Amino acid sequence: AELCALNGIYAAGNACSALSGLFAELVEECLQDEGVADSSVRTTGKSSMLAFARDELASHSRSYERLLKQRVRSLITDWCGADDVFDCDGRLCLQNLRLFIENEEYNLDSASFKTQESEERLEVEIIGPVRTSQIFIEVGQDKCDAAVTLQMAEAMSWKSTEIILDLLFRGDKAFNDWGAMLLSKQVRMLQNLYCGLVLDSTKAGATPINTASILKQFERINQAVSILQLEKPSDWLAFSYQVGESYDTNLTVEEIQKVMRLRVDFSEDAIMKVCSQMKAS
């Protein structure tokens, strides 16, 4: 029933958007008939009524988009795991992810790394619980519109990366270069899993869904992984990258500092020097 509601919200928003576009074309035609070149000029009569309908429908479309996002995130919380870090018994797939990362060792030697990075192990302990979650089962039964599936994959991606970042920012984990490689593989497997959910749900002959919005959810954790894989803190000044200007896709200087402090072989002086230069730039 919940998935039907999500499909209905998406369909309503899409219909409002399409009708708004239609009214926008009618406004342009009407303005041309009235001899008005600029559509932003306030008019009266028929064109004014059409413009009002266009704007109202566009507003409704945006409201449906916001509602869909809210309902999807609520569904992910109910079916995959709540935000409450203390309510974490591992029954739900994102609760399981939190417990797994929390208990995972990242200060490794080469032998331990070989054991822990085994795809069979990661499939059973991280990927499997997500793949067999209610969300994945329902999507696999073709109960969701492709656009709704994309929204759910985005929400799961966002929540997964925030779980991992939250655990990193606490400062309880210890990393060396082997551990950084392990986390990189774990993040990459999650990213591929969520992209696969969307791509696999696309019907034959349909236009493929762009997964760029899913990859965007991983930008901050990918930055953290890149920092953990540095040879030394100062390398970040040369290799650092940003995605736009938003904190939604970039780590802050304070967060970068927290991540660098997880590396057991990075000195505090070297970290502070790099962070001071970033703040000054």
Image (spheres, helix red, strand yellow):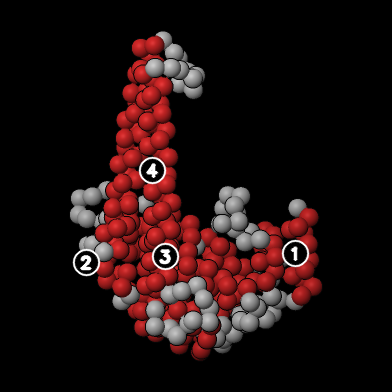
User: Callout 2: helix, strand or loop?
Assistant: loop
Query: Nearer the viewer's eye, disc 1 or disc 4?
Result: 4
Separation (CA) of disc 2 from disc 1: 50 Å
User: Would you place residue 104 above or below residue 240 in this image?
Assistant: below
Query: Nearer the viewer's eye, disc 3 or disc 1?
Result: 3
Separation (CA) of disc 2 from disc 4: 28 Å
Q: Which residue is mark 1?
A: 274
Query: Nearer the viewer's eye, disc 2 or disc 3?
Result: 3
Separation (CA) of disc 2 from disc 3: 21 Å
Dot 3 or dot 1: first in sequence order is: 3
Q: Which residue is mark 2?
A: 141
| Residue 4, horizontal then vertical, whole percent | 26, 59
| Residue 151, horizontal then vertical, whole percent | 38, 57
Q: Which residue is mark 3?
A: 74
Image point (39%, 79%), residue name:
92
Query: Nearer the viewer's eye, disc 2 or disc 4?
Result: 4
Image point (42%, 56%), residue name:
69
Q: Which residue is mark 4?
A: 61
User: Callout 1: helix, strand or loop?
Assistant: helix
